[in-house]
Amino acid sequence: MKRAAPLAASIVALVLLFHVGRVRCLPESTLRRSSPPATDGLCAALIRPSGYPCSEHTVETEDGHLLGIQHIPHGRKGLDGNPRRPVFLQHGLFMGGDAWFANSVDESLGFILVDSGFDVWVGNVRGTSWSHGHSTLSVHDKEFWDWSWQELAQYDLLAMISYVYLVTNSKIFYIGHSQGTIMGLAAFTMPEVVQMIESAALLCPISYLDHISSTFVLRAVSLHLDQLLLSMGIHQLNFRSDMGIEILDTICDGHMDCNNLLASITGDNCCFNLSRMDYYLEFEPHPSSTKNIRHLFQMIRKGTFAKYDYGLLGNLKHYHQLHPPAFDLADIPNSLPLWMGYGGKDALSDITDLQRTIKELKSKPKMLYIDDYGHVDFILSEKAKDDVYGELIKFLKSQECYSSY
Ligand SMILES: *[C@@H]1O[C@H](CO)[C@@H](O)[C@H](O)[C@H]1NC(C)=O
């Protein structure tokens, strides 16, 4: 398997770690218990307990999904009178907004941004534990799961960014990880989104996926896991469910070294705190849709950064053309400053694919390369504060436009 699970699939990996082979060391109940109830909210679960103020907000997308957004207006010491510019954090696949707060206060990017003087807003895409509502559908309806990252870019991101823009009356710094970078790059080709963005920092940037080296994902692609699941009527992909765990077992069964599952999905992570695994598993992995996985597999198989492929007839119906329209990276305005952090051990955000992305962009992103970082390190490394976040924050601050004050 190779390619597929992308992005923050890390999390899946986490789960797997415990489920396959020697990994059966976690009590079953830890993995199988249901996701945290949305009413509790991420603020109550992770942010307020660390002493930070936090409020919950809900936005509705054009197609009826209700998304949770968290706002952390200042740190533990209160406001200092300096203007705070809004930063919007967009998590990756199988992750939720909790991923930005999963390490200690000194190590987690979410807390570090608050303490560095930013006004922090946390996005959560449809289907995650923090965004599980819909105006008419229930999570048990297959229509609830009828979307891929295309809708996450076109509907979720548009709705969340518009909300923050309206409330703060300010352009927004965008930070995305993994699938959050696919969403960002696709959405930045839309003038109505990019006009609200001051600059963007992308961790493990992805637009093309055809060079990924993840053994786990490539195996899932070669097994046609996407078609298989859809033909079985499985539209929600939840690795906390019995079905999800069976899927993992199937992929791993005797064919690869699942004792090191996380690495086989994301690449070797140098600086991940293994003793924190139980804690991560309280929140991750979040559900996603089978259609989303299928869309990602299409990118892996075809080497495209395009809309979802419905097949010739379906494409005619949806797009009035035989092939799905591509997202053109050259449509992202040169005036949008970009920063990218990428790692030499990342099996999902491959350097060859990234070079193609950069070639097609009009603007020249500022790059930070870390040789021994894998896909998860950019979010969960114990040293990311020194290795990555300092540079990232320097970039954001160098872009700040004080003229609005
Ligand atoms: C690793 O995780 C453990 C358990 O949560 C924690 O006690 C320890 O401080 C962490 N180490 C670092 C360097 O963050």
Image (tube, rainbow, N blue to C red):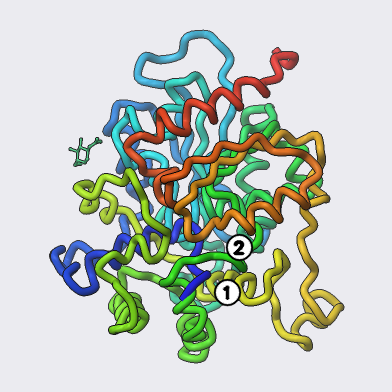
> In this rendering, is residue 187 above or below 404?
below
Q: Is mark 2 within 8 Å of ligand 1?
A: no
The image position of residue 386, as x and y in percent, is: 41, 28
Task: Tell me if residue 383 comes above or below residue 75 in the rendering.
Answer: below
Question: Going by the image, does 156 lie left or right of 286?
Answer: right
Mark 2 crowd level (few <14, some 14–19, many ≥20, 10 Å Cα): many
Q: Which quadrant contains ligand 1? A: top left
Q: Residue furthest right?
A: 320
> Which image quarter: residue 266?
bottom left
For residue 72, what is the image quadrant? Answer: top left
Q: Can you identify the residue that label 1 sits on?
A: 297
- Seen at 75% across and 42% down, the residue is 194
In which quadrant is the C terminus drawn? top right
**Does residue 245 appear in the picture of this structure?**
yes
* Residue at the image point whose x is 71% and y is 56% from the top: 356
The residue at the far bottom in this view is 231
Left or right, residue 232 beside residue 156? left
Q: Which of 40 and 245 is in front in this view?
A: 245
Q: Is 338 displayed left or right of 270 in the figure? A: right
Furthest-top residue in view? 81
Q: Residue at x 68, y 33 (%)?
A: 199
Find the distance from the CA under tag 2 to the CA under tag 1. 12 Å
